Image: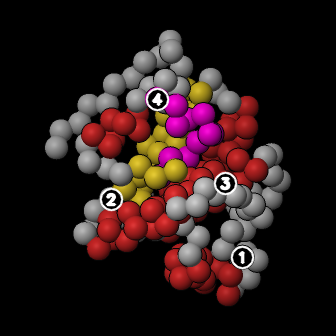
Amino acid sequence: MLNRSMKPGCASLSREVLDDLERDCRVGLVLLGRPYHHDPGLNQGILEAFQDLGYPVLSQSYLPMDEDLLEHLFGVEVEEKVVESPLDVSDVWRNSASGNTNQKIWAAKFAARHPSLIPVELSNFKCGHDAFVSGVIEQIIESSGKPYFCFRDLDENKPWRLYASA
């Protein structure tokens, strides 16, 4: 089961962004990563580059857990007893390595089901925990038919640059 605490207001702001994206038929991104991936030095500015292109980036830590949204995204699986609750990841990950791993997997499930979200997976230095979970995340997203971005070996010796045109 997923267990997390959130700063007040962050999840409600994320819900507003999601509602706006859905209403306007736009796409946003959700970061699948470790807490340190919010640091621009460690993420090499990837999140800011996407934001500069007009894509809002939400944190996996602050995805909204409003009852109506969770029912919409996970209700069928709960009803069919595939999972015990909308926050359950045991259908795809039975052996948890860490709370952050559970959160990353749950956020991948959330993004795979939400029509306006595309996941961005980040990993530095081939992080040990991520070596196991990346394949699970890949399966979750690919089964939804959505594209996703994954940057799995970020470090200062392998700089990257985002090339895109509007």
Dividing the image into 4 quarters, which one contains the N terminus? bottom right
Mark toward the start of the polypeptide (1 vs 3) = 1
The circle on residue 27 is: 2
Left or right for 89, reference 52 = right
Whether residue 138 is visible, yes or no, is no
Decide which of tag 4 and tag 3 comes sooner along the chain: 4
- Residue 41 is left or right of residue 88, and the answer is left
Identify the element where label 1 is drawn.
loop
The amino acid marked with disc number 1 is Ser
Q: Which residue is mark 3?
A: 103
Which amino acid does the dot numbered 2 rest on?
A: Val
* Disc 3/disc 2 C-alpha distance (Å): 21 Å
Identify which residue is drawn at 83% across, 53% down. 95
Find out whether the residues at labels 4 and 3 contact each other: C-beta distance under 8 Å: no
Q: Is residue 144 above or below residue 148?
A: below
Which comes before the other along the chain, label 3 or label 2? 2
Q: Nearer the viewer, mark 4 or mark 1?
A: 4
**Mark identifier at residue 40:** 4
Give the number of the disc on residue 85: 1
Residue type at numbered disc 4:
Pro
148 drawn magenta: no
Judging from the image, what secondary structure is the residue with disc 2 in?
A: loop
Position of residue 121 in the picture relative to residue 126 (left or right): left
Q: Could you tell which of marks 4 and 2 lies nearer the N-terminus?
A: 2
Distance CA(mark 4)–CA(mark 2):
22 Å
- Please name the residue shown 36% across and 51% down the image: 56
Distance, label 1 to label 3, CA atoms, is 14 Å
